Amino acid sequence: MNALVLPPHLELDHPLVHTPSFRHAASAMAGLLARNKIGLIDGPPGTGKSTFAQWAAEQSDRPSAIAVMPEDPRPLDLLRISITAVTGHNPTGSNKTEMEAELAEALGEWQGLLVLDEVQNVRIKGLTEARYIHDITRPRFPLLLVGYGAMATVRENTPLDSRIRLRRTFRTLSGQDLFDTVRTIDDRLATVPDDVIRYADDKFARGNLRQWVDLIETLQDWNVTAPTRTDFDDAIVSIDEEAAA
């Protein structure tokens, strides 16, 4: 156990924005970490789920690792990827029983935060595996599940559903939260009227944080400091010609 993974360095491809969803999830993380519970973060792509998970891992006062599930996982991928994320090396076990024992032992000694991202890909069988591993450590580590549509899958799994301590849904931006968040990403938009921001949102971003970051970064690349509707139109064309039609 000499190759344990330390808290990851927060290297984001966009600004860390504390949206309402982010703040609500952050407020519950202390209890999850202190009591080694299971948390669940759900929500559409681009709403900040993975960014929050990475931030939570970096901020925790214990080791942490993030294991990202592939789109079409093989039967043992959850175990294999988790072992590699936690220990820093490939599994020594060659079958399910051996890998379960290896991961449980590693997690029991490690006692860090394990984040399983894109868990919707492993479906109910993989989530059952994650719950089993958490249970057999009695439990000695906190577990954060992140994925779009994971909430519905978890509710079909009563043993896992009953163990969820933190349950949050990351949502698209709307109303005043939209205006405040956009201006937080780039304070140069402070003087841009609400109706112009709404125009760009209706035409392209639709409350999606990632889409807004792409839009604002395009304007930044062009040194546009007080964008008009025309500026937003040009940026949208630059990003997605079809979306601008």
Image: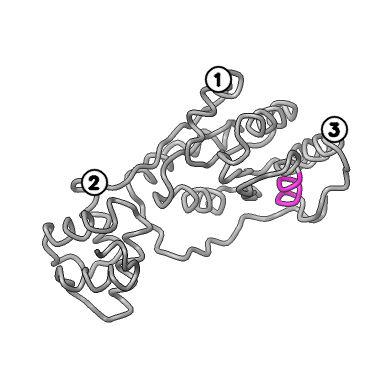
Q: Which color scheme does this rendered protein use? A: one colour
Q: Please identify the dominant SS of the magenta region.
A: helix
Residue 174's disc is: 2
**85 in the magenta segment:** yes
Image position, residue 43 (x, y; %): 42, 41
Please name the amino acid that badge 2 sits on. Ser
Q: Is residue 15 magenta?
A: no
Mark identifier at residue 162? 1
Residue at the spot 47% in from the left edge and 65% down from the top edge: 13
Q: Secondary structure at mark 3?
A: helix
Residue at 48% over, 63% down: 12
Tell me which amino acid carries mark 3. Answer: Thr
Crowdedness near tag 3: few (<14), some (14–19) or many (≥20) residues, C-alpha within 10 Å: few
Mark closer to the chain start, 1 or 2: 1
Would you identify the image quadrant in which residue 133 lies? Answer: top right
For mark 1, does the 10 Å Cα neighbourhood hold few (<14), some (14 to 19), or many (20 or more) residues?
few
User: What's the magenta region?
Assistant: 80-86
Secondary element under disc 1, as helix, strand or loop, is loop
- Seen at 62% across and 50% down, the residue is 68
Q: Nearer the viewer, residue 153 or 27?
A: 153
The foreground one among 121 and 141 is 121
